[in-house]
Amino acid sequence: EDKVVQSPLSLVVHEGDTVTLNCSYEVTNFRSLLWYKQEKKAPTFLFMLTSSGIEKKSGRLSSILDKKELFSILNITATQTGDSAVYLCAVEYAGGTSYGKLTFGQGTILTVHP
Amino acid sequence: SQTIHQWPATLVQPVGSPLSLECTVEGTSNPNLYWYRQAAGRGLQLLFYSVGIGQISSEVPQNLSASRPQDRQFILSSKKLLLSDSGFYLCAWSVGVNEKLFFGSGTQLSVL
């Protein structure tokens, strides 16, 4: 059974701290791994990772994928209260009728205090 | 630009009542459409996906059904709601080989 596990499930930090969120997966025919940020309602896209060892970066956020060890990390440096959200990891698997389907992890709830 | 509309935002329904949630996408053609559910404290679970009009694939056996009467319209339905149908329902779309999903704003369904 395809599985995506995120850790920690929740995290409380203070502004300025650096956080690392983890995502491990067991998926048949891996195609890509995606990170989403969910504030209140709709998740918004952060990163798509397909190749090992290549860091994706956007401002204070960065992410990297290890396809050998089957995990990804999402780093947030100099956290701000606006980073408080649920961070979702999802893995897309390829082939046949599985086109475009994602399996999501349970999410990490990040709370950043002033 | 592409936009996705989902309504209603919140819904409170009694057990045994019918359900209809609607999702429409603008600014794109032949999108892949998805319905996800997020139960409290859990990740997103794929319920249905559709690659074209009238083509619906179900991921989990359940009390719900989906229909795609038009290219950019996706409907989630139930004839009789159960308590376990409560949750946060998200519609999403993607196009072609780019598998990024773009989500609607969601519907919070409470079945009482």
Image (spheres, coloured by chain):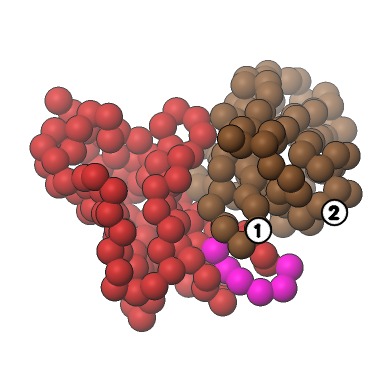
Chain colours: A red, B brown
Distance CA(mark 1)–CA(mark 2): 16 Å
Left or right of A37 on screen, residue B33: right
Left or right of B31 on screen, residue A37: left
Tell me where the magenta segment starts and ends, as one range: A92-97
Q: Residue at x 16, y 46 (%)?
A: A77
Please determine if labels 1 and 2 lie on a single subunit: yes
Residue topped by disc 2: B55
The percent coordinates of residue A66 (x first, y second) are: 33, 73
Q: Is residue A112 above or below residue A108?
A: above
As rendered, which of A83 and B38 lies closer to the eye? A83
Q: Residue at x 39, y 53 (%)?
A: A47
The percent coordinates of residue B92 (x first, y second) are: 63, 42
As rendered, which of B77 and B73 lies closer to the eye? B73
Q: Chain of mark 1?
A: B
Label 1 Cα crowd, 10 Å radius (few <14 / some 14-19 / many 20+): few
Label 2 Cα crowd, 10 Å radius (few <14 / some 14-19 / many 20+): few
**Residue B95 colored in magenta in the image:** no
- Which residue is the extreme one toward the left? A16
Amino acid type at circle 2 is Gln
Please give the label number shown on residue B96. 1
SS at badge 2: strand
